[in-house]
Image: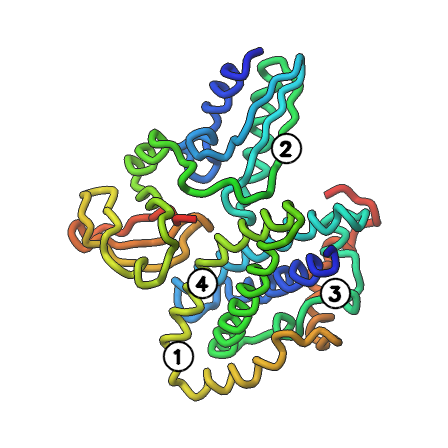
Amino acid sequence: MTEAAVWEALAEIPDPEIPVISVVDLGVVREVRVEAERVHVEFTPTFLGCPALEVMRDAMAARIAELGADPEVEVVLDDSWSTDRITPEGREKLRAAGFAPPTPRGEGTTLVQLQSTGFRCPYCGSRDTALENIFGPTPCRSLRYCRDCKQPFEQFKTI
Amino acid sequence: MSELLLEIADDELILGWRDSEWTGIAPFLEEDVAFSSIAQNEVGHARALYELAARDLGATADELAFDREPSEYRCSELVELRLPEWERTIARHVLYEQADAERLERLKASDDPEVAGLAAKIDREEIYHRLHAEMWHERLKDEPRYVEALEELRPLVGKRNGHTPELTTLWEEMTSVRRSQPAGTTW
């Protein structure tokens, strides 16, 4: 069992709430260590209240068990995850599925900035979009509206 | 430190329950979504904080959240109240987010790396609660009923030397499922 094989297997596990993207694309797998029969995975959740946390943890453990190893999935509650950890491939998959990927973290998020235009519509690419609601169907998403193609869309929150 | 973690966890758990009371009945759909989402975040923060406190207290997060008597909770009176009036809910939201931001800044500077790390993670999510509170404050700041609500609730922000009867009512509701099963039940 190599670490690369474990990463490859984990890359097949979809995010339970946005299944177009895998847990590896999402950047929540922090470390994989193989020690003989035991595979240790460090995993850090996106949002603390995300109900997908246990689903992801159990799916990773089950996938590692399928590879014939003894899984040990540790949930680390520190500050190591941000939306900057979503991979370039992950961002492209989000966009193709109609979710605007998060903007880079930069200098912090303000109301003025969220209410400004400049967030790109994932359907037509226009930047003439408006904030509809800071909150959306899951903690990680906001709702925006494209004034050009008249389409509402979901924006991954930058955190 | 575990006392302070419990204080914050209790605030977040109780406020999360109170915020969730708007699910389905907020004045409009956007706010139904917003308060439901904020409630989900607050309960998630409470869980992580209870887990950290449990490390030093020899208990589990669930035991800390649900197996104490109402008098043992360390939450402030501000979060205990059932506030079916929108302007009072927004006033509480604004007051709580301000106080919580200051508290999180202090925790982020903690010498305990687990505490500082968790506080920083919580703070990233709270940014969006603060923006939501700021947006509503701007909308309502000249409304007399809102201004009165701010004045009424401000003294309760740090009031932790007792509890309102409303905490007991909420506690009974919050723990009823857990209390319906024998101690030691695996959930």
* Type of amino acid under label 3: Tyr
- The percent position of residue A51, horizontal first and vertical second, equals 55, 44
Residue at label 3?
Answer: B73
According to the picture, the residue beneath numbered tag 4 turns out to be: B32
Residue marked by disc 2 = A74
Q: Which mark is residue B140?
A: 1
Mark 4 and mark 3: Cα distance apart in space: 28 Å
Question: What's the amino acid at mark 2?
Answer: Glu
Tag 1–tag 3 contact (CB < 8 Å)? no
Is label 1 in contact with label 2 (beta carbons under 8 Å)?
no
Circle 1 residues within 10 Å: few <14, some 14–19, many ≥20: some
Q: Are marks 4 and 3 in contact (CB under 8 Å)?
A: no
**Mark 2 vs mark 4, CA separation in Å:** 34 Å
Q: Amino acid at mark 1?
A: Leu
Same chain? Circles 1 and 3: yes
Label 2 resides on the chain identified as A
